[in-house]
Image (cartoon, rainbow, N blue to C red):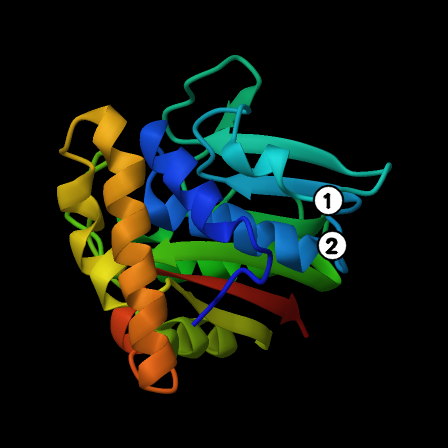
């Protein structure tokens, strides 16, 4: 289970709840920040299913000066986003991108294997795929919501496509925050930081007295993963 080591982790999550930002989204942004501190986004990058170019990870990801991101979606919400159907062959030449990003999108794609195989095709040799997908979260169609993936499923369909696993990381703090977060988000906005801080502290206390026995995949809100094209 991912624990953000910095002391302001709980404060960051509480502030995000006040701003209507989901727990999985905030944990994803923090995971991106941690990963890209040593592995910055670089070269030609394509974001599959971004919807907009005003994505939250832009405030967290470290980027090289030569990084250029192309944003794509089936239903673009801004002018700087190119239209793409992730269930069909991408209208993109072979081996043109250094990195592929795909955050909180795979659950909405019925032919998810197409995303993996087409991403592999458009990546240069040793190119990197960085993604995330929710696990213990409510149904949320956009326009559809098909799947929840375990780490075994993520590992299987990416390795079958020719990717090498770099990282698969469950994101969350513990059962209280994962289980109660979406109830908390229905509370008045002013109360959300207080309620979320309470359940996060309960999780940290539970982890302390059980030697982290209640962390890990059983209570993952989502997964963050990185693969490399062989």
| Mark 2 residue element | loop
Q: Is residue 126 above or below residue 97?
A: below
Task: Decide if residue 87 is in sight here.
Answer: no
> Residue 35 appears at what percent x and percent y?
65, 59
107 sits to left or right of 188: right
State the separation of the CA atoms marked 2 and 1. 6 Å
Mark 1 — residue? 62
Classed neighbour count for the residue bearing mark 2: other residues with Cα under 10 Å, few (<14), some (14–19), many (≥20)? few
Q: Is residue 226 above or below residue 83?
A: below
- The one nearer the camera, 225 or 179, is 179
Q: Given contact means CB atoms under 8 Å apart, are the residues at marks 2 and 1 in contact?
A: yes
> Residue 71 appears at what percent x and percent y?
56, 31
Residue lying farthest right? 65
Residue at (22% x, 62% y) in the render: 176
Residue at (58% x, 62% y) in the render: 5
- Point out the image quarter for the C terminus: bottom right
Q: Is residue 72 above or below residue 212?
A: above
- Point out the image quarter for the N terminus: bottom left
Residue 37 is marked as 2
Give the quadrant of residue 229: bottom right
- The one nearer the camera, 117 or 177, is 177
> Residue 87 appears at what percent x and percent y?
36, 47
Give the quadrant of residue 165: bottom right
* Marks 2 and 1, the one that precedes in the sequence: 2
Classed neighbour count for the residue bearing mark 1: other residues with Cα under 10 Å, few (<14), some (14–19), many (≥20)? many
| Mark 1 residue element | loop
> Residue 140 appears at what percent x and percent y?
19, 41
């Amino acid at each position: 289970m991912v624990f953000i080591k910095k002391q302001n982790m709980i404060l960051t999550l509480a502030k995000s709840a006040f701003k209507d930002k989901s727990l999985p989204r905030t944990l994803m942004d923090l995971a991106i920040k941690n990963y890209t501190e040593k592995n910055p986004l670089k070269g030609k990058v394509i974001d599959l299913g971004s919807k907009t170019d005003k994505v939250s990870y832009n405030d967290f990801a470290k980027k090289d000066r030569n990084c250029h991101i192309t944003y794509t979606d089936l239903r673009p919400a801004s002018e700087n986003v190119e239209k793409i159907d992730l269930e069909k062959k991408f209208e993109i030449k072979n081996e043109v991108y250094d990195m592929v990003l795909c955050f909180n999108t795979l659950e909405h794609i019925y032919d998810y294997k197409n995303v993996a195989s087409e991403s592999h095709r458009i990546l240069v040799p040793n190119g990197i795929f960085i993604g995330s997908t929710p696990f213990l979260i409510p149904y949320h169609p956009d326009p559809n919501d098909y799947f929840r993936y375990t780490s075994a499923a993520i590992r299987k369909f990416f390795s079958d496509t020719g990717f090498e696993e770099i990282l698969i990381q469950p994101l969350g703090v513990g059962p209280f925050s994962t289980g109660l977060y979406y109830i908390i988000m229905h509370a008045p906005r002013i109360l959300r930081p207080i309620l979320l801080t309470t359940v996060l502290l309960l999780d940290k206390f539970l982890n302390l007295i059980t030697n982290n026995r209640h962390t890990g995949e059983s209570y993952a809100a989502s997964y963050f993963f990185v693969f490399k094209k062989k």
